[in-house]
Structure formats: structure tokens, C-alpha cells
Image (cartoon, coloured by chain):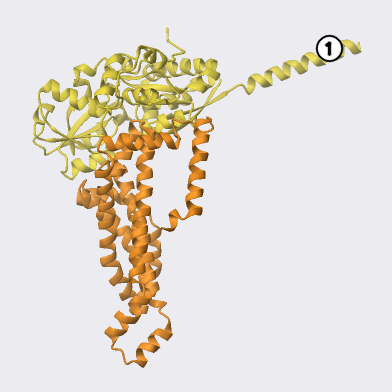
């Protein structure tokens, strides 16, 4: 009798211990992303709000940076386990220079989220009108820089390029007449377009050569990825499910986006046409050879990645079926 | 140069050796904190690309211009505030508050007015520079020893003579301290603004190198700034010695 009681108690203790382990089994991942508020950069927050990551027992600690270089440094130093929405050329450069990072997935393919604008009273109406005019870009090698050069070649126009910096600084320079054309990523500045203070004169999606190129990728810290492959698989499964959820539940996801950005739902709705779901596909990382050529031509690296490096830079642990 | 006196030189060499050892031993991630030898090689790279001497001259030219404007406005303003006790007391806390304010955050406003140009950088630097010069000049003038003024009066010195031969020379150390602070703050302001608006000299270069993940070269740019700052401060020290009364 005593023996039976002891066995029962031991089994009960084991069940309680197992269930408590299961209850605290959420893995915390530190993630870092740029462009807070952009549709594609808010996938994780949308997934968290929809409870998708919780189902995979993943707890996300999301931080936002000023841009790709900051995100790369955060991941390379281990400050973040994974980084999101970083220019492919910048990642290629950092990897070639020894940063302990791997490309874990594509982030954005094409440049449909990018648009170019001028003041409403400007004589410029399309990208074809910008010969001899000035156009702003963030910095050499950025997606705005790449798209502008490809569009200029495509439309046979010769603007003068001015490094105007990030979006707020670019807007200031356009509105004060220092630069004729600015760049922006939706939803930023769409409110000024709606208020007829700005007009859109071209889209990143007009750049045909960029339509199939993965311009931004997501990265992981090499050491973290090696030690947490199971966690990474669960993370990417939840991430892919979050993207699906955003497009299957536009009313909810656009309401979230409006809340994240402090804009109206109607303003948020204007964002969606700029982000076809296929642009957010996590796989494949398309036209990678073109990105390598871009990295060389923009002097991010002095020579193309070797075949071994091209293989080693990827560590994709999850591909959605 | 006291910075290169034997104890300082030994401390510098030891620090460099420790950093080299830590980087080579894997104690620091070399891709983020490169070894000093890699940084030394980085100097060659950025010099070959023309990103060292020219940008350094631009940055220091802007910082010096800002400090000069700060001195031209700040020294007379400090003297005036010292001579007018009521104004001096009224503005003292304002000046202290402004000195502590992060004026660099106003750069979008200055971009609108002065555009993305050296003018924006110099004028913002001058605003940063003028404050310590005013504060230090006023303090220096107020702290002229009474005995010196008494000596001037005993020699029947005119107000002009008392100012140029007694009060101003006595205040020179404080004024130079203000100029030294102004130079440091305007240099920090200049480099920060160049980094922010991606324009100008070494701040822009460091921003570009950071974006391209050229970390040793980036540190080489930072070391250049430190070395040239030391040279500027040394020159200021020498100027102070020449101006200071024996």
C-alpha cells in the first residue's frame, strides 16, 4: 500500500514537473529591425499581436534601429539574435569582411514599397522629367540609390544625385527647395500626398531590373543559429504564418498598422497595394548574383564573393511548403 | 607635449598592446573591435582612397571656423556680462541651461535655413562654441584679483589701460579654457552633424565606412579625429602660454 502510494506520488510529481517545464518552455529571441512602422518590418509585431509566436512557444524581444548598418552591428555583436530588413548589398559586404552573420531568409523582393515624390507645385510630374534636376537618396548602395540609378538608366534621364539622408531629412530638403525629388517608403509621407502637398512622380516598382531582385534580407547571428536551430525553425514557421495572417485578415492587420503608425485605417489601407504578398516571400533570395555585382560596383566589396562564400553566407533553416 | 611624456606614452603603449592581445586572443569580436594593427592598416586604406587628409581638413576647418565665430561673439559678450552685474546674474542660468542643451537636435531647422552645407555645420558649431566662451570669459573677468585692480588705480591707470593691461591679461587663462571647451564641443558637434546629414569631412567618411562595414577603416577615422584633437589642444596650450602674463 505504502509502495503504491509512493509510486503514485512520484508519478504525480513527474507530471507536475513536466507540465511546469512545458508551461515555461517559451524561448526568448532578441530581434532587431529597421524602419519601424513599415508593413514588412511589422510582421513580427503583427504575429505577436495575433498570438502566432506564442503558439510556437516563442517570446520576442523586438527592438528597432535607425537602419541596416545598426541592425548588422547589433546581430554581429550578439546584441540581437536576428536582424530584419537589411539591404542585401550591405549584408554581403559585412559577411565578406568577417561579420559572424548568415542570411536566414529573403525579406523583400522588388522595390514596390519605394516611391519618389516632388512638391505639388513642381514642374516635375514623372521620372522622365528629372534630367538636370536633383534627386535625394539615403547613401550609396541603399535601395533608394540602386532604384534611382536603375530607373535613370531605364528612362534615359540624367539627374544629379544628392545624399539627403533618411526620410525626414529628405522631406525637409525637398520642402525647402534644396532638392527637387525625394524618396520615401510607404506609409511615410503618404499623408502629405493625400493632403496634396506632395505628388508621387515614380515608384520603385517601375524599375524593371529590380522587380525580381531580393533587395533586403533577414539575418541571424552565426553562433546563435548554430546553438538554436530548433528555435529558429519554430520562429520562421511563425514568421511565415504571420505574413499569411496579415494578408488573410487585412481588416485586422491594417487596423494594427494604423495603430503602430498613429494613422487612420484609411491611410493604412493605401499601404497595401505597395506590398504584394509575393514581395515578402521568405524564399528564394532572388538575383543574388546581381546583388553581389551591385556590392562590387558600389565599392562595398572589392571583389565578388567566391563560390564557397556564396554558399556559406546562407543558412536557411525553414522553407515554407 | 605633456600627452607624450614618458608615463603617458608607456600607458598608451600598454593599452595598445592589451587591445592587440585581446583582439588576437578572441576576447573581443575582431569584426566589431578590431586589433590596433588592423586599424593601423585601415589608415593606409582610407588614405589611398583620398578619405583621410581632405576630409580631416574640412572637419577641422569647420570646427575652427565655428570656434573662431564663437570667440569673436563670446569674448565681448562675456566681458559685457561681467561689467553689467545685473545682466550677468540674469543670464547666467540661461547660459548654463543652453550649454547643457542638446542643440545638435535642432539640425532639421538649420537645414531648412542654411541648407545641407558647411554653413549649417559651422553655424550650429558656433552656437555650441559661443556658450562656454561667454561663461568662462565672464567668470575670468569677475575673478580678476582685487589687488591687481588696486595696483592699477595706484598708478592712475585709465579705464582703457586697466582693462588691456590688467583685467584682460588676468582673465586670459579662463578665456582660453572657454576656447578649449568651445573647440572640443564644436568638434564633437561638427562630426556629429557630418555623420547625421552625411555631408562634409570625417563624420561623413565614418558614416560611409560604418554603412559599408569597413570597421578597421572606421576606427582609423575615429583615431584620426582623436589625434588631430590632441594636436589642436596642444596648439591652444602654446597660444595660451604666449598670451598669459608672466
- Residue bearing mark 1: A7
Q: Is residue A256 left or right of residue A208?
A: right
- In this view, A267 is above or below B201: above
Considering depth in this image, is A75 or A199 the residue closer to the camera? A75
- In this view, B186 is above or below A53: below
The quadrant where residue A71 appears: top left
Q: Number of callouts in the render?
A: 1
Considering depth in this image, is B117 or B85 the residue closer to the camera? B117
The C terminus of chain A: image quadrant: top left
Residue B121 seen in this snapshot = yes
- Chain that is yellow in the image: A
Q: Which hue is chain B drawn in? A: orange
The quadrant where residue A12 appears: top right
Considering depth in this image, is A53 or A136 the residue closer to the camera? A136
x 22%, y 49%: residue: B118
Rendering coords of residue A205 (x, y %)? 22, 21
The N terminus of chain A: image quadrant: top right
Amino acid at each position: 500500500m505504502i509502495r503504491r502510494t509512493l509510486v503514485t506520488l512520484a508519478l504525480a510529481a513527474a507530471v507536475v514537473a513536466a507540465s511546469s517545464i512545458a508551461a515555461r518552455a517559451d524561448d526568448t529571441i532578441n530581434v532587431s529591425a529597421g524602419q519601424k512602422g513599415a508593413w514588412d518590418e511589422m510582421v513580427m509585431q503583427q504575429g505577436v499581436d495575433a498570438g502566432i509566436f506564442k503558439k510556437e512557444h516563442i517570446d520576442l524581444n523586438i527592438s528597432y534601429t535607425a537602419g541596416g548598418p545598426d541592425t548588422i552591428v547589433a546581430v554581429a555583436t550578439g546584441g540581437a539574435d536576428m536582424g530584419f530588413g537589411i539591404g542585401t548589398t550591405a549584408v554581403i559586404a559585412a559577411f565578406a569582411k568577417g561579420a559572424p552573420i548568415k542570411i536566414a531568409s529573403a525579406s523583400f523582393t522588388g522595390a514596390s514599397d519605394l516611391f519618389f515624390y516632388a512638391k505639388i507645385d513642381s514642374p516635375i510630374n514623372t521620372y522622365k522629367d528629372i534630367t538636370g534636376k536633383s534627386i535625394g537618396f539615403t547613401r550609396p548602395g541603399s535601395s533608394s540609390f540602386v532604384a534611382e540609378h536603375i530607373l535613370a538608366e531605364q528612362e534615359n534621364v540624367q539627374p544629379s544625385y544628392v545624399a539627403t539622408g533618411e526620410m525626414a531629412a529628405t522631406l525637409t530638403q525637398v520642402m525647402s527647395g534644396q532638392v527637387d525629388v525625394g524618396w520615401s517608403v510607404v506609409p511615410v509621407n503618404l499623408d502629405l500626398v493625400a493632403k496634396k502637398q506632395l505628388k508621387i512622380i515614380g515608384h520603385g516598382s517601375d524599375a524593371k531590373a529590380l522587380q525580381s531582385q531580393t533587395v533586403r534580407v533577414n539575418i541571424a547571428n552565426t553562433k546563435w543559429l548554430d546553438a538554436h536551430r530548433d528555435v529558429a525553425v519554430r520562429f520562421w514557421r511563425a514568421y511565415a504564418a504571420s505574413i499569411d495572417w496579415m494578408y488573410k485578415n487585412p481588416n485586422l492587420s491594417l487596423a494594427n498598422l494604423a495603430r503602430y503608425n498613429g494613422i487612420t485605417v484609411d491611410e493604412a489601407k493605401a499601404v497595401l497595394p505597395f506590398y504584394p504578398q509575393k514581395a515578402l516571400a521568405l524564399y528564394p533570395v532572388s538575383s543574388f548574383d546581381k546583388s553581389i555585382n551591385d556590392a562590387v560596383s558600389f565599392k562595398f566589396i572589392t571583389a565578388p564573393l567566391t563560390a564557397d562564400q556564396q554558399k556559406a553566407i546562407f543558412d536557411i533553416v525553414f522553407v515554407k511548403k | 607635449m605633456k600627452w607624450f611624456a614618458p608615463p603617458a606614452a608607456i600607458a598608451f603603449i600598454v593599452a595598445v598592446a592589451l587591445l592587440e592581445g585581446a583582439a588576437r586572443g578572441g576576447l573581443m569580436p575582431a569584426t566589431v573591435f578590431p586589433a590596433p594593427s588592423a586599424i593601423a592598416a585601415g589608415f593606409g586604406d582610407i588614405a589611398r582612397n583620398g578619405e583621410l587628409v581632405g576630409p580631416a581638413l574640412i572637419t577641422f576647418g569647420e570646427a575652427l571656423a565655428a570656434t573662431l565665430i564663437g570667440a569673436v561673439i563670446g569674448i565681448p559678450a562675456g566681458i559685457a556680462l561681467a561689467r553689467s552685474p545685473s545682466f550677468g546674474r540674469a543670464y547666467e542660468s540661461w547660459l548654463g541651461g543652453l550649454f547643457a542643451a542638446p542643440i545638435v537636435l535642432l539640425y532639421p531647422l538649420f537645414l531648412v535655413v542654411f541648407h545641407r552645407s558647411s554653413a549649417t555645420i559651422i553655424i550650429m558649431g558656433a552656437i555650441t562654441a559661443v556658450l562656454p566662451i561667454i561663461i568662462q570669459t565672464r567668470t575670468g573677468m569677475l575673478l580678476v584679483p582685487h589687488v591687481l585692480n588696486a595696483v592699477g588705480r595706484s598708478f592712475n591707470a585709465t579705464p582703457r589701460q586697466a582693462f588691456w593691461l590688467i583685467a584682460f591679461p588676468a582673465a586670459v587663462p579662463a578665456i582660453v579654457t572657454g576656447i578649449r571647451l568651445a573647440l572640443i564641443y564644436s568638434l564633437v558637434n561638427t562630426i556629429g552633424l557630418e555623420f547625421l546629414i552625411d555631408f562634409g569631412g570625417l563624420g561623413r567618411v565614418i558614416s560611409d565606412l560604418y554603412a559599408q562595414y569597413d570597421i578597421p577603416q572606421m576606427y582609423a577615422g575615429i583615431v584620426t579625429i582623436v589625434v588631430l584633437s590632441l594636436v589642436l589642444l596642444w596648439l591652444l596650450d602654446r597660444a595660451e602660454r604666449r598670451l598669459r602674463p608672466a
